[in-house]
Amino acid sequence: MRREQWDKQHEELRAELKSIRTNANLTQEELAARLETKQSFISKYERGERTLDFVEVILVCNACGYSPAKLIRKLSIPNR
C-alpha cells in the first residue's frame, strides 16, 4: 500500500473518531476520564501525532457509545 493512501486512511479515521466524540457531547477530558488516560492521549491521536491500534479504536468507540462495527463499515478502506 502506498504511503499516501495509508495517510489518507489514518486521516479519515482520526476525523471519524473526533466526530464520534463530539456527537457524543464529550470533551477530550471527559473521554480521557472514561478511558482512564490523559487528555493529551486524545489530543495527540486527533491531531495525528499518534496512531491508535485496533483495540484502542474499539475502546474509544465503546467509551463514546458508538458501535465499532458501524465505524468500520463507514470508513472507505478498499477491499482487495
Image: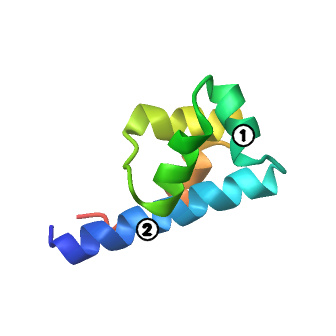
Q: What kind of residue is marked 1?
A: Glu
Give percent across and percent down for residue 77.
Answer: 37, 65
- Residue 43 relative to residue 12: left or right: right
Quadrant position of residue 32: top right
Q: Is any part of residue 65 visible from this angle?
A: no
In the rendered view, would you say 35 is above or below 65?
A: above
Q: Which of 60 and 76 is in front in this view?
A: 60
Give percent across and percent down for residue 11.
Answer: 43, 68
- Residue 37 relative to residue 7: left or right: right
Closer to us: mark 2 or mark 1?
1
Give percent across and percent down for residue 78.
Answer: 32, 68
Residue occupied by mark 2: 11
Q: What kind of residue is marked 2?
A: Glu
Q: Which residue is drawn at 61% across and 51% down?
A: 70
In the rendered view, would you say 66 is above or below 72?
A: above
Quarter of the image with the N terminus is: bottom left
- Residue 72 relative to residue 2: left or right: right
**Most distant residue in the top direction:** 36
The earlier-in-sequence mark between 2 and 1 is 2
Give percent across and percent down for residue 39.
Answer: 62, 40
Circle 2 residues within 10 Å: few <14, some 14–19, many ≥20? some
Q: How far apart are marks 2 and 1 (CA)?
A: 22 Å
Residue occupied by mark 1: 29
Q: Residue at x 51, y 40 (%)?
A: 41
Q: Residue at x 40, y 38 (%)?
A: 54
Q: Which residue is drawn at 79% across and 46% down?
A: 26
